[in-house]
Image (spheres, rainbow, N blue to C red):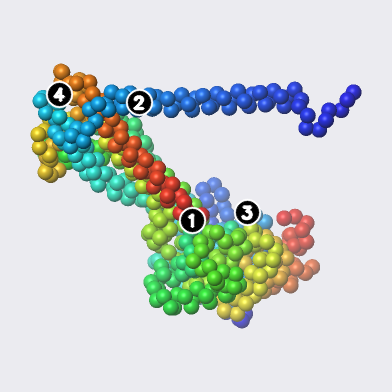
Amino acid sequence: MVSTANKIEIRGLRAAYPGKVVLEDVSLDVREGEILAIIGPAGAGKTSLLNCINRMSDMIPSMKVEGSIRIDGREVRDFRDPSELRRRIGVVFPLPVGLPMSIFDNVAFAPRMGGMHDKKKLAELVERCLRQAALFDEVKDRLGDLGTRLSGGQQQRLTIARALSLDPEILCLDEFSIAVDPVTTMKIEEVIKELKQRMTIILATNLVLQARRLGDRTALFLDGRLVEIAPTETIFSRHTADVRTFQYVQGVFG
Amino acid sequence: MNTPLPFSTTAVTQANRNRESVIRALLGIVTVLLVLPLLAILGLLVKHGAPAMTLDFLLTAPAAGMTAGGIFPAIVGTLWLVGVSLAVAAPIGVLAAIYLNEYAGDHWGTRIVHLAIVNLAGVPSIVHALFGVGAFVLFLHLGTSILSASLTLAIMTLPVIIASTKEALAAVPMSFRQACWVLGASRWQTIRHVVLPNSIQGILTGVILQVSRAAGETAPVMFTGAAFYLPFLPQSVHDQCMALSMHLFTLSTQVPGVPEALPYATALVLVALVMSVNLTSILLRSYLRSRRKW
Protein backbone atom coordinates (compact mmCIF):
# COMPACT_ATOMS: atom_id res chain seq x y z
CA MET A 1 0.00 0.00 0.00
CA VAL A 2 1.21 3.48 -0.74
CA SER A 3 2.24 5.24 2.42
CA THR A 4 3.82 8.61 2.95
CA ALA A 5 7.06 7.08 4.25
CA ASN A 6 10.00 7.43 1.92
CA LYS A 7 11.64 4.19 0.85
CA ILE A 8 14.37 5.86 -1.18
CA GLU A 9 15.64 9.40 -0.76
CA ILE A 10 17.89 10.78 -3.47
CA ARG A 11 19.62 14.11 -2.92
CA GLY A 12 21.92 16.01 -5.26
CA LEU A 13 22.77 12.96 -7.32
CA ARG A 14 25.30 13.52 -10.08
CA ALA A 15 26.72 10.81 -12.32
CA ALA A 16 29.21 11.25 -15.11
CA TYR A 17 31.43 9.39 -17.53
CA PRO A 18 34.63 11.06 -18.68
CA GLY A 19 33.43 14.00 -20.77
CA LYS A 20 29.72 13.31 -20.35
CA VAL A 21 27.36 14.06 -17.48
CA VAL A 22 24.45 11.60 -17.41
CA LEU A 23 22.72 12.76 -14.21
CA GLU A 24 22.87 16.27 -12.79
CA ASP A 25 21.49 17.46 -9.47
CA VAL A 26 18.73 14.88 -9.16
CA SER A 27 16.72 14.91 -5.94
CA LEU A 28 13.60 12.84 -5.51
CA ASP A 29 11.88 10.48 -3.10
CA VAL A 30 10.36 7.10 -3.81
CA ARG A 31 7.55 6.28 -1.40
CA GLU A 32 7.09 2.97 0.29
CA GLY A 33 4.79 0.73 -1.76
CA GLU A 34 4.26 3.02 -4.73
CA ILE A 35 4.95 2.54 -8.38
CA LEU A 36 7.11 5.42 -9.49
CA ALA A 37 7.18 5.65 -13.28
CA ILE A 38 10.18 7.36 -14.80
CA ILE A 39 9.68 8.61 -18.32
CA GLY A 40 11.95 10.41 -20.73
CA PRO A 41 13.57 9.86 -24.10
CA ALA A 42 16.67 7.71 -24.62
CA GLY A 43 19.67 9.26 -22.92
CA ALA A 44 17.56 11.04 -20.30
CA GLY A 45 19.34 9.24 -17.46
CA LYS A 46 16.70 6.64 -16.51
CA THR A 47 19.05 3.66 -16.65
CA SER A 48 21.88 5.58 -14.97
CA LEU A 49 19.56 6.41 -12.08
CA LEU A 50 18.69 2.74 -11.59
CA ASN A 51 22.38 1.80 -11.81
CA CYS A 52 23.18 4.25 -9.03
CA ILE A 53 20.44 2.94 -6.73
CA ASN A 54 21.77 -0.64 -6.64
CA ARG A 55 25.38 0.44 -7.09
CA MET A 56 25.80 -1.38 -10.38
CA SER A 57 27.65 1.86 -11.10
CA ASP A 58 30.54 0.28 -9.13
CA MET A 59 30.94 -2.22 -11.97
CA ILE A 60 31.47 0.55 -14.53
CA PRO A 61 34.97 1.82 -13.65
CA SER A 62 34.73 5.03 -15.66
CA MET A 63 31.45 6.10 -14.03
CA LYS A 64 31.72 8.66 -11.20
CA VAL A 65 28.78 9.09 -8.83
CA GLU A 66 28.31 11.89 -6.30
CA GLY A 67 25.46 12.81 -4.01
CA SER A 68 23.33 10.85 -1.61
CA ILE A 69 21.00 7.88 -2.04
CA ARG A 70 19.37 6.55 1.11
CA ILE A 71 17.28 3.40 1.32
CA ASP A 72 15.30 3.21 4.57
CA GLY A 73 17.56 6.01 5.74
CA ARG A 74 20.74 4.13 5.05
CA GLU A 75 23.27 5.54 2.62
CA VAL A 76 23.84 2.99 -0.19
CA ARG A 77 27.50 3.97 -0.36
CA ASP A 78 27.92 2.72 3.22
CA PHE A 79 27.13 -0.89 2.31
CA ARG A 80 30.54 -2.53 2.56
CA ASP A 81 29.38 -5.37 0.34
CA PRO A 82 27.24 -4.12 -2.56
CA SER A 83 25.89 -7.69 -2.93
CA GLU A 84 23.98 -7.16 0.31
CA LEU A 85 22.36 -4.08 -1.20
CA ARG A 86 21.63 -5.76 -4.52
CA ARG A 87 19.91 -8.70 -2.84
CA ARG A 88 17.30 -6.23 -1.57
CA ILE A 89 16.70 -4.72 -5.01
CA GLY A 90 15.33 -6.77 -7.88
CA VAL A 91 16.26 -5.56 -11.36
CA VAL A 92 14.80 -6.34 -14.77
CA PHE A 93 16.81 -5.18 -17.77
CA PRO A 94 15.41 -3.97 -21.13
CA LEU A 95 16.53 -7.06 -23.02
CA PRO A 96 15.56 -10.41 -21.50
CA VAL A 97 18.54 -12.34 -20.19
CA GLY A 98 17.99 -16.02 -19.54
CA LEU A 99 21.11 -17.29 -17.85
CA PRO A 100 22.64 -20.30 -19.66
CA MET A 101 21.18 -22.83 -17.22
CA SER A 102 17.86 -24.54 -16.66
CA ILE A 103 14.68 -22.59 -15.95
CA PHE A 104 14.72 -23.95 -12.40
CA ASP A 105 18.37 -23.00 -11.88
CA ASN A 106 17.73 -19.52 -13.25
CA VAL A 107 15.25 -18.80 -10.49
CA ALA A 108 17.20 -20.71 -7.84
CA PHE A 109 20.47 -18.98 -8.75
CA ALA A 110 20.34 -16.02 -6.39
CA PRO A 111 19.08 -17.97 -3.33
CA ARG A 112 21.78 -20.57 -3.90
CA MET A 113 24.45 -17.88 -4.16
CA GLY A 114 23.10 -16.60 -0.86
CA GLY A 115 23.70 -20.01 0.71
CA MET A 116 20.27 -21.67 0.42
CA HIS A 117 20.53 -25.31 -0.64
CA ASP A 118 17.47 -27.00 0.89
CA LYS A 119 15.93 -28.75 -2.13
CA LYS A 120 12.36 -28.64 -0.88
CA LYS A 121 12.49 -24.96 0.02
CA LEU A 122 14.11 -24.13 -3.33
CA ALA A 123 11.42 -26.02 -5.23
CA GLU A 124 8.68 -24.14 -3.38
CA LEU A 125 10.42 -20.84 -3.95
CA VAL A 126 10.95 -21.43 -7.66
CA GLU A 127 7.30 -22.36 -8.15
CA ARG A 128 6.11 -19.33 -6.19
CA CYS A 129 8.31 -16.90 -8.14
CA LEU A 130 7.35 -18.40 -11.50
CA ARG A 131 3.67 -18.13 -10.54
CA GLN A 132 4.09 -14.50 -9.50
CA ALA A 133 5.72 -13.79 -12.84
CA ALA A 134 2.81 -15.50 -14.66
CA LEU A 135 5.13 -18.02 -16.24
CA PHE A 136 4.62 -21.17 -14.19
CA ASP A 137 1.78 -22.68 -16.22
CA GLU A 138 3.75 -22.37 -19.45
CA VAL A 139 6.90 -24.04 -18.16
CA LYS A 140 5.82 -26.29 -15.29
CA ASP A 141 6.48 -29.48 -17.28
CA ARG A 142 9.92 -28.45 -18.46
CA LEU A 143 11.68 -26.71 -15.61
CA GLY A 144 14.85 -28.56 -16.62
CA ASP A 145 14.97 -26.93 -20.06
CA LEU A 146 17.44 -24.19 -20.78
CA GLY A 147 16.25 -20.72 -19.83
CA THR A 148 17.98 -19.34 -22.91
CA ARG A 149 15.73 -21.40 -25.20
CA LEU A 150 12.50 -19.74 -24.07
CA SER A 151 10.87 -17.11 -26.25
CA GLY A 152 11.74 -13.47 -25.61
CA GLY A 153 8.53 -12.77 -23.70
CA GLN A 154 8.95 -15.89 -21.58
CA GLN A 155 12.58 -15.03 -20.87
CA GLN A 156 11.52 -11.60 -19.69
CA ARG A 157 9.03 -13.16 -17.27
CA LEU A 158 11.78 -15.58 -16.22
CA THR A 159 13.94 -12.54 -15.49
CA ILE A 160 11.13 -11.15 -13.32
CA ALA A 161 10.77 -14.47 -11.49
CA ARG A 162 14.51 -14.39 -10.89
CA ALA A 163 14.36 -10.83 -9.62
CA LEU A 164 11.64 -11.91 -7.17
CA SER A 165 13.60 -14.90 -5.90
CA LEU A 166 15.21 -12.92 -3.09
CA ASP A 167 11.91 -11.35 -2.05
CA PRO A 168 13.24 -7.84 -2.72
CA GLU A 169 11.85 -4.70 -1.07
CA ILE A 170 12.41 -2.70 -4.24
CA LEU A 171 11.89 -3.77 -7.84
CA CYS A 172 13.45 -1.76 -10.66
CA LEU A 173 12.16 -2.39 -14.16
CA ASP A 174 14.12 -0.77 -16.97
CA GLU A 175 12.02 -0.59 -20.14
CA PHE A 176 11.01 -4.20 -19.64
CA SER A 177 8.66 -4.22 -22.64
CA ILE A 178 11.15 -3.11 -25.25
CA ALA A 179 11.66 -6.63 -26.64
CA VAL A 180 8.34 -8.13 -25.63
CA ASP A 181 5.11 -8.58 -27.59
CA PRO A 182 2.01 -6.61 -26.56
CA VAL A 183 0.21 -9.62 -25.04
CA THR A 184 3.16 -10.45 -22.80
CA THR A 185 3.52 -6.79 -21.95
CA MET A 186 -0.06 -6.72 -20.65
CA LYS A 187 0.58 -9.92 -18.69
CA ILE A 188 3.64 -8.38 -17.08
CA GLU A 189 1.77 -5.18 -16.33
CA GLU A 190 -0.82 -7.25 -14.44
CA VAL A 191 2.05 -8.90 -12.55
CA ILE A 192 3.44 -5.50 -11.62
CA LYS A 193 0.08 -4.35 -10.24
CA GLU A 194 -0.04 -7.48 -8.08
CA LEU A 195 3.52 -7.00 -6.82
CA LYS A 196 2.79 -3.45 -5.78
CA GLN A 197 1.02 -4.84 -2.72
CA ARG A 198 4.33 -6.03 -1.36
CA MET A 199 7.14 -3.88 -2.70
CA THR A 200 8.20 -0.51 -3.94
CA ILE A 201 8.52 -0.41 -7.72
CA ILE A 202 10.46 1.90 -9.97
CA LEU A 203 9.43 1.61 -13.58
CA ALA A 204 11.61 3.30 -16.17
CA THR A 205 9.83 3.38 -19.49
CA ASN A 206 9.72 5.36 -22.68
CA LEU A 207 6.12 4.40 -23.24
CA VAL A 208 4.25 7.28 -21.67
CA LEU A 209 0.98 5.37 -21.76
CA GLN A 210 2.57 2.56 -19.76
CA ALA A 211 3.52 5.12 -17.13
CA ARG A 212 -0.06 6.38 -17.16
CA ARG A 213 -1.47 2.86 -16.72
CA LEU A 214 0.86 1.83 -13.92
CA GLY A 215 2.44 4.80 -12.18
CA ASP A 216 1.15 6.18 -8.89
CA ARG A 217 3.49 9.04 -9.50
CA THR A 218 5.48 9.85 -12.60
CA ALA A 219 8.81 11.61 -13.01
CA LEU A 220 10.04 13.10 -16.27
CA PHE A 221 13.76 13.20 -17.01
CA LEU A 222 15.40 15.14 -19.80
CA ASP A 223 19.14 15.24 -20.48
CA GLY A 224 20.04 13.88 -17.07
CA ARG A 225 17.87 16.29 -15.11
CA LEU A 226 14.62 15.74 -13.29
CA VAL A 227 12.06 17.99 -14.96
CA GLU A 228 9.04 17.22 -12.83
CA ILE A 229 7.74 14.61 -10.42
CA ALA A 230 4.05 14.54 -9.55
CA PRO A 231 1.06 12.21 -9.18
CA THR A 232 0.49 10.54 -12.52
CA GLU A 233 -2.87 12.22 -13.09
CA THR A 234 -1.21 15.62 -12.73
CA ILE A 235 1.53 14.73 -15.19
CA PHE A 236 -1.09 13.67 -17.71
CA SER A 237 -3.26 16.75 -17.18
CA ARG A 238 -3.01 20.33 -18.45
CA HIS A 239 -1.71 21.43 -15.09
CA THR A 240 1.89 20.29 -15.23
CA ALA A 241 4.36 22.47 -13.41
CA ASP A 242 6.71 22.51 -16.36
CA VAL A 243 5.48 23.08 -19.89
CA ARG A 244 7.97 20.52 -21.24
CA THR A 245 6.18 17.80 -19.32
CA PHE A 246 2.91 18.64 -21.06
CA GLN A 247 4.65 18.75 -24.42
CA TYR A 248 6.49 15.47 -23.89
CA VAL A 249 3.42 13.62 -22.69
CA GLN A 250 1.40 14.98 -25.59
CA GLY A 251 4.08 13.88 -28.03
CA VAL A 252 5.16 17.35 -29.11
CA PHE A 253 8.77 16.11 -28.83
CA GLY A 254 10.34 12.92 -27.58
CA MET B 1 11.55 -0.30 -77.70
CA ASN B 2 10.92 -3.60 -76.03
CA THR B 3 10.70 -3.51 -72.29
CA PRO B 4 12.97 -6.21 -70.89
CA LEU B 5 11.32 -9.11 -69.16
CA PRO B 6 11.42 -8.88 -65.39
CA PHE B 7 14.43 -10.70 -63.93
CA SER B 8 16.09 -10.97 -67.33
CA THR B 9 19.86 -10.68 -67.57
CA THR B 10 21.30 -7.24 -68.15
CA ALA B 11 24.89 -6.37 -68.94
CA VAL B 12 25.46 -5.35 -65.30
CA THR B 13 24.06 -8.51 -63.74
CA GLN B 14 25.97 -10.63 -66.24
CA ALA B 15 29.24 -8.87 -65.37
CA ASN B 16 28.49 -9.35 -61.69
CA ARG B 17 27.82 -13.00 -62.22
CA ASN B 18 31.08 -13.48 -64.14
CA ARG B 19 33.07 -11.67 -61.47
CA GLU B 20 31.42 -13.81 -58.82
CA SER B 21 32.53 -17.07 -60.46
CA VAL B 22 36.08 -15.80 -61.01
CA ILE B 23 36.46 -14.82 -57.36
CA ARG B 24 34.89 -18.02 -56.17
CA ALA B 25 37.34 -20.05 -58.26
CA LEU B 26 40.28 -17.98 -57.05
CA LEU B 27 39.40 -18.45 -53.38
CA GLY B 28 38.87 -22.16 -53.95
CA ILE B 29 42.25 -22.58 -55.62
CA VAL B 30 44.04 -20.79 -52.80
CA THR B 31 42.35 -23.07 -50.29
CA VAL B 32 43.42 -26.17 -52.18
CA LEU B 33 47.00 -24.86 -52.45
CA LEU B 34 46.94 -24.44 -48.70
CA VAL B 35 46.14 -28.09 -48.07
CA LEU B 36 48.59 -29.46 -50.65
CA PRO B 37 51.82 -28.92 -48.67
CA LEU B 38 50.35 -30.72 -45.68
CA LEU B 39 49.33 -33.69 -47.79
CA ALA B 40 52.73 -33.66 -49.53
CA ILE B 41 54.58 -33.69 -46.20
CA LEU B 42 52.45 -36.50 -44.85
CA GLY B 43 52.86 -38.50 -48.07
CA LEU B 44 56.61 -38.07 -48.04
CA LEU B 45 56.90 -39.05 -44.39
CA VAL B 46 54.76 -42.13 -44.85
CA LYS B 47 56.57 -43.18 -48.04
CA HIS B 48 60.06 -42.93 -46.58
CA GLY B 49 59.27 -43.67 -42.96
CA ALA B 50 56.92 -46.61 -43.30
CA PRO B 51 59.64 -49.27 -43.76
CA ALA B 52 61.12 -48.42 -40.33
CA MET B 53 57.74 -48.09 -38.63
CA THR B 54 57.51 -51.19 -36.47
CA LEU B 55 56.37 -51.83 -32.95
CA ASP B 56 60.01 -52.40 -32.06
CA PHE B 57 60.85 -48.95 -33.38
CA LEU B 58 58.32 -47.41 -31.02
CA LEU B 59 59.24 -49.48 -28.00
CA THR B 60 63.05 -49.79 -27.95
CA ALA B 61 65.94 -47.42 -27.38
CA PRO B 62 68.32 -46.30 -30.10
CA ALA B 63 71.20 -48.70 -30.69
CA ALA B 64 74.50 -48.92 -32.55
CA GLY B 65 75.33 -45.21 -32.21
CA MET B 66 71.82 -44.10 -33.29
CA THR B 67 72.00 -45.97 -36.59
CA ALA B 68 69.59 -48.67 -35.44
CA GLY B 69 66.97 -49.36 -32.78
CA GLY B 70 63.95 -47.26 -31.88
CA ILE B 71 62.85 -44.00 -30.32
CA PHE B 72 61.13 -45.11 -27.12
CA PRO B 73 63.12 -42.83 -24.75
CA ALA B 74 62.44 -39.85 -27.01
CA ILE B 75 58.69 -40.49 -26.96
CA VAL B 76 58.72 -40.83 -23.18
CA GLY B 77 60.88 -37.72 -22.87
CA THR B 78 58.55 -35.62 -25.01
CA LEU B 79 55.59 -36.72 -22.89
CA TRP B 80 57.48 -35.69 -19.74
CA LEU B 81 58.42 -32.30 -21.15
CA VAL B 82 54.96 -31.53 -22.45
CA GLY B 83 53.23 -32.82 -19.32
CA VAL B 84 55.33 -30.86 -16.85
CA SER B 85 55.30 -27.66 -18.90
CA LEU B 86 51.54 -27.88 -19.20
CA ALA B 87 51.11 -28.51 -15.49
CA VAL B 88 52.96 -25.25 -14.89
CA ALA B 89 51.66 -23.08 -17.74
CA ALA B 90 47.97 -24.02 -17.84
CA PRO B 91 46.96 -23.05 -14.29
CA ILE B 92 49.08 -19.90 -14.23
CA GLY B 93 47.92 -18.85 -17.68
CA VAL B 94 44.24 -19.48 -17.01
CA LEU B 95 44.30 -17.71 -13.64
CA ALA B 96 46.15 -14.73 -15.09
CA ALA B 97 43.64 -14.52 -17.93
CA ILE B 98 40.73 -14.62 -15.48
CA TYR B 99 42.28 -11.77 -13.55
CA LEU B 100 42.94 -9.72 -16.66
CA ASN B 101 39.52 -10.24 -18.18
CA GLU B 102 37.27 -10.25 -15.12
CA TYR B 103 38.95 -8.14 -12.45
CA ALA B 104 41.56 -5.78 -13.88
CA GLY B 105 40.22 -2.55 -15.27
CA ASP B 106 41.48 -0.81 -18.35
CA HIS B 107 44.31 1.48 -17.23
CA TRP B 108 48.00 1.98 -17.99
CA GLY B 109 49.08 -0.88 -15.71
CA THR B 110 46.99 -3.51 -17.47
CA ARG B 111 47.87 -2.06 -20.87
CA ILE B 112 51.54 -2.64 -20.11
CA VAL B 113 50.75 -6.21 -19.11
CA HIS B 114 48.85 -6.76 -22.37
CA LEU B 115 51.73 -5.31 -24.34
CA ALA B 116 54.16 -7.57 -22.52
CA ILE B 117 52.05 -10.65 -23.26
CA VAL B 118 51.74 -9.84 -26.94
CA ASN B 119 55.46 -9.25 -27.23
CA LEU B 120 56.36 -12.33 -25.23
CA ALA B 121 54.30 -14.37 -27.69
CA GLY B 122 56.42 -12.97 -30.51
CA VAL B 123 59.82 -13.77 -28.99
CA PRO B 124 61.68 -16.40 -31.08
CA SER B 125 62.04 -19.77 -29.41
CA ILE B 126 65.84 -19.66 -29.47
CA VAL B 127 65.67 -16.55 -27.28
CA HIS B 128 63.41 -18.41 -24.87
CA ALA B 129 66.02 -21.17 -24.89
CA LEU B 130 68.82 -18.82 -23.90
CA PHE B 131 66.62 -17.27 -21.23
CA GLY B 132 65.91 -20.78 -19.93
CA VAL B 133 69.61 -21.54 -19.68
CA GLY B 134 70.27 -18.30 -17.84
CA ALA B 135 67.28 -18.33 -15.53
CA PHE B 136 66.60 -21.97 -14.74
CA VAL B 137 69.74 -23.96 -15.52
CA LEU B 138 72.26 -21.49 -14.10
CA PHE B 139 70.58 -18.92 -11.86
CA LEU B 140 68.14 -21.26 -10.11
CA HIS B 141 70.68 -24.12 -10.21
CA LEU B 142 68.13 -26.52 -11.68
CA GLY B 143 70.79 -27.84 -14.06
CA THR B 144 69.96 -29.28 -17.45
CA SER B 145 66.88 -31.21 -16.48
CA ILE B 146 63.29 -31.90 -17.44
CA LEU B 147 62.31 -29.20 -14.96
CA SER B 148 64.44 -26.52 -16.62
CA ALA B 149 63.29 -27.51 -20.10
CA SER B 150 59.63 -27.67 -19.09
CA LEU B 151 59.76 -24.30 -17.37
CA THR B 152 61.30 -22.84 -20.52
CA LEU B 153 58.51 -24.36 -22.61
CA ALA B 154 55.98 -23.05 -20.08
CA ILE B 155 57.31 -19.50 -20.39
CA MET B 156 57.03 -19.86 -24.14
CA THR B 157 53.45 -21.17 -24.20
CA LEU B 158 52.14 -18.97 -21.38
CA PRO B 159 51.38 -15.83 -23.40
CA VAL B 160 49.37 -17.77 -25.96
CA ILE B 161 47.44 -19.61 -23.24
CA ILE B 162 46.65 -16.28 -21.58
CA ALA B 163 45.55 -14.74 -24.88
CA SER B 164 43.33 -17.66 -25.91
CA THR B 165 41.79 -17.97 -22.45
CA LYS B 166 41.05 -14.25 -22.38
CA GLU B 167 39.36 -14.55 -25.73
CA ALA B 168 37.24 -17.47 -24.51
CA LEU B 169 36.18 -15.53 -21.40
CA ALA B 170 35.39 -12.41 -23.40
CA ALA B 171 33.09 -14.47 -25.63
CA VAL B 172 30.67 -14.94 -22.71
CA PRO B 173 28.14 -12.12 -23.10
CA MET B 174 28.48 -9.24 -20.64
CA SER B 175 24.72 -9.38 -20.04
CA PHE B 176 25.13 -12.72 -18.22
CA ARG B 177 27.56 -11.14 -15.79
CA GLN B 178 25.30 -8.15 -15.21
CA ALA B 179 22.33 -10.41 -14.62
CA CYS B 180 24.31 -12.24 -11.94
CA TRP B 181 25.62 -9.08 -10.31
CA VAL B 182 22.20 -7.51 -9.90
CA LEU B 183 21.14 -10.73 -8.16
CA GLY B 184 23.81 -10.09 -5.54
CA ALA B 185 26.28 -12.67 -6.84
CA SER B 186 29.90 -11.68 -6.24
CA ARG B 187 32.41 -11.47 -9.04
CA TRP B 188 33.88 -14.84 -8.14
CA GLN B 189 30.46 -16.52 -7.87
CA THR B 190 29.62 -15.15 -11.30
CA ILE B 191 32.89 -16.43 -12.75
CA ARG B 192 32.61 -19.80 -11.05
CA HIS B 193 28.96 -20.52 -11.91
CA VAL B 194 28.36 -18.72 -15.19
CA VAL B 195 31.49 -17.49 -16.94
CA LEU B 196 33.77 -20.53 -16.56
CA PRO B 197 31.20 -23.24 -17.35
CA ASN B 198 30.41 -21.40 -20.57
CA SER B 199 33.95 -20.69 -21.69
CA ILE B 200 35.64 -23.95 -20.72
CA GLN B 201 35.49 -25.20 -24.31
CA GLY B 202 37.53 -22.29 -25.62
CA ILE B 203 39.95 -22.44 -22.69
CA LEU B 204 40.64 -26.15 -23.16
CA THR B 205 41.06 -25.79 -26.90
CA GLY B 206 43.61 -23.05 -26.44
CA VAL B 207 45.54 -25.04 -23.85
CA ILE B 208 45.56 -28.23 -25.91
CA LEU B 209 46.82 -26.43 -28.99
CA GLN B 210 49.79 -25.29 -26.95
CA VAL B 211 50.55 -28.93 -26.14
CA SER B 212 51.21 -29.64 -29.78
CA ARG B 213 53.37 -26.55 -30.04
CA ALA B 214 55.43 -27.53 -27.01
CA ALA B 215 55.88 -31.05 -28.36
CA GLY B 216 57.38 -29.80 -31.60
CA GLU B 217 59.80 -27.18 -30.29
CA THR B 218 63.50 -28.05 -30.44
CA ALA B 219 65.48 -24.99 -29.46
CA PRO B 220 64.00 -24.39 -25.99
CA VAL B 221 64.66 -27.95 -24.84
CA MET B 222 67.99 -28.43 -26.58
CA PHE B 223 70.05 -26.33 -24.14
CA THR B 224 67.96 -26.80 -21.06
CA GLY B 225 67.15 -30.45 -20.60
CA ALA B 226 66.98 -32.63 -23.68
CA ALA B 227 69.89 -35.01 -24.12
CA PHE B 228 71.60 -36.22 -27.25
CA TYR B 229 71.36 -39.82 -26.16
CA LEU B 230 70.31 -41.47 -22.91
CA PRO B 231 70.21 -45.22 -22.46
CA PHE B 232 67.76 -44.97 -19.53
CA LEU B 233 64.40 -43.35 -18.94
CA PRO B 234 64.09 -40.29 -16.69
CA GLN B 235 63.08 -41.10 -13.12
CA SER B 236 62.16 -37.59 -11.98
CA VAL B 237 61.96 -34.00 -13.22
CA HIS B 238 65.58 -33.52 -12.18
CA ASP B 239 66.84 -35.98 -14.79
CA GLN B 240 67.55 -35.15 -18.38
CA CYS B 241 65.53 -36.82 -21.08
CA MET B 242 65.50 -37.35 -24.79
CA ALA B 243 62.90 -35.58 -26.93
CA LEU B 244 61.42 -36.42 -30.32
CA SER B 245 62.14 -33.03 -31.85
CA MET B 246 65.71 -33.05 -30.59
CA HIS B 247 66.19 -36.66 -31.68
CA LEU B 248 65.03 -35.81 -35.17
CA PHE B 249 67.54 -32.98 -35.31
CA THR B 250 70.29 -35.33 -34.11
CA LEU B 251 69.46 -38.07 -36.59
CA SER B 252 69.24 -35.68 -39.52
CA THR B 253 72.36 -33.61 -38.94
CA GLN B 254 74.63 -34.92 -36.23
CA VAL B 255 75.18 -38.62 -36.82
CA PRO B 256 76.73 -40.06 -39.98
CA GLY B 257 75.47 -43.28 -41.47
CA VAL B 258 71.86 -43.21 -40.25
CA PRO B 259 69.55 -45.24 -42.51
CA GLU B 260 67.22 -42.89 -44.38
CA ALA B 261 64.06 -44.39 -42.94
CA LEU B 262 64.90 -43.58 -39.30
CA PRO B 263 64.58 -39.77 -39.36
CA TYR B 264 61.48 -40.04 -41.55
CA ALA B 265 59.85 -42.48 -39.18
CA THR B 266 60.77 -40.27 -36.21
CA ALA B 267 59.26 -37.26 -37.94
CA LEU B 268 56.16 -39.29 -38.72
CA VAL B 269 55.73 -40.17 -35.04
CA LEU B 270 56.17 -36.54 -34.04
CA VAL B 271 53.68 -35.31 -36.63
CA ALA B 272 51.22 -38.07 -35.70
CA LEU B 273 51.52 -37.09 -32.03
CA VAL B 274 50.90 -33.42 -32.78
CA MET B 275 48.02 -34.17 -35.12
CA SER B 276 46.33 -36.49 -32.69
CA VAL B 277 46.52 -33.83 -30.00
CA ASN B 278 45.01 -31.29 -32.40
CA LEU B 279 42.33 -33.77 -33.37
CA THR B 280 41.48 -34.28 -29.71
CA SER B 281 41.10 -30.54 -29.38
CA ILE B 282 38.82 -30.34 -32.40
CA LEU B 283 36.66 -33.22 -31.17
CA LEU B 284 36.46 -31.71 -27.70
CA ARG B 285 35.47 -28.38 -29.14
CA SER B 286 32.71 -29.80 -31.28
CA TYR B 287 31.45 -31.94 -28.41
CA LEU B 288 31.29 -28.96 -26.06
CA ARG B 289 29.81 -26.72 -28.71
CA SER B 290 26.97 -29.18 -29.18
CA ARG B 291 26.18 -28.59 -25.51
CA ARG B 292 26.32 -24.85 -25.86
CA LYS B 293 23.61 -23.21 -23.86
CA TRP B 294 22.75 -20.07 -25.72
Label 3's element?
A: loop
Image location of residue A74, percent across then percent down: 47, 72
Image location of residue A58, percent across then percent down: 46, 58
Residue B59 in which image quadrant: top left
| Most foreground residue, A123 or A2 | A123
Q: Is residue A43 above or below residue A37?
A: above
Residue underneath mark 3: A43
Q: Report the amino acid beneath label 4.
A: Thr
* Residue at 32% in and 40% down: B277
Chain letter behind tag 3: A
CA–CA distance in space, label 2 to label 3: 63 Å
Q: Residue furthest right?
A: B1
**Foreground mark, 2 or 3?**
2
Determine which of the numbered discs, if any, sits on residue B43 in the image: 2
Q: Report the amino acid beneath label 1.
A: Lys
Query: Within 10 Å of the Cα at label 1, are there few (<14), some (14-19), or many (20+) other Cα atoms?
Result: some
Residue underneath mark 4: B67
**Foreground mark, 1 or 3?**
1
CA–CA distance in space, label 1 to label 3: 33 Å
Asked whether, in this view, residue B5 is left or right of residue A5, the answer is: right
